[in-house]
Amino acid sequence: MTAVDSSARAVARVEAHAAANGVVIEAVEADAFRYLETATPRAFDLVVIDPPKFARARKDLEAARKGYERLNALALQATAPGGIIVTCSCSQNVDAETFERIVAAGAKHAGREVRIFERRGPASCHQLPPAFPEGQYLKVLLGHVH
């Protein structure tokens, strides 16, 4: 098992939690894009990508789209056939439909097929008023990779 994060603090927490629970994990401090660029193709049965917010404002939307697409393409290249990808977005300016299109574009770029088997959003403890769609910023897609 490998965990990659650009934050030294996050890597230290992963290592501490793994040790406390008797789990063997390789925690790597690295930029996820750079790590995935050098990862062995189709080597991982499960890839989880949960980047920080890419689109802080509407003006950032095109750059965010490109970033999410590239990150998903790299993650899909690293996922073994029959493996699972869990991809997330916490950018409120990227709606669920757009995020799915971005993941599809990343799959096309990677030459892979993804079949979404589950869509998730905020947990039930993340309650929102009905007139606050901006609060629906958490998006999670789970897919089989072929």
Image (cartoon, rainbow, N blue to C red):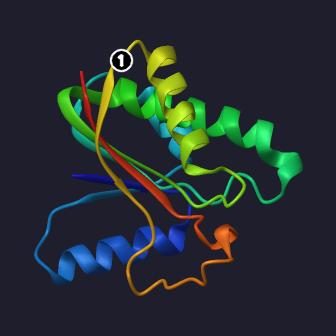
Q: Secondary structure at mark 1?
A: loop
Residue most extreme to the left:
22
**Which image quadrant for residue 81?**
top left
Q: Nearer the viewer, residue 79 or 62?
A: 62
Q: Residue at x 51, y 16 (%)?
A: 109
**Which image quadrant for residue 46?**
top left
User: Could you tell me if residue 60 is visible in this image?
Assistant: yes
Residue most extreme to the right:
59
Residue 128, position as x, y percentages in the image: 56, 83
Give the answer, above or below, for where 129 lies relative to 120. below
Q: Residue at x 56, y 47 (%)?
A: 31
Q: Amino acid at mark 1?
A: Arg
Residue under label 1: 112
Give the answer, above or below, for where 85 lies relative to 53. above
Q: Nearer the viewer, residue 128 or 74?
A: 128
Q: How many marks?
A: 1
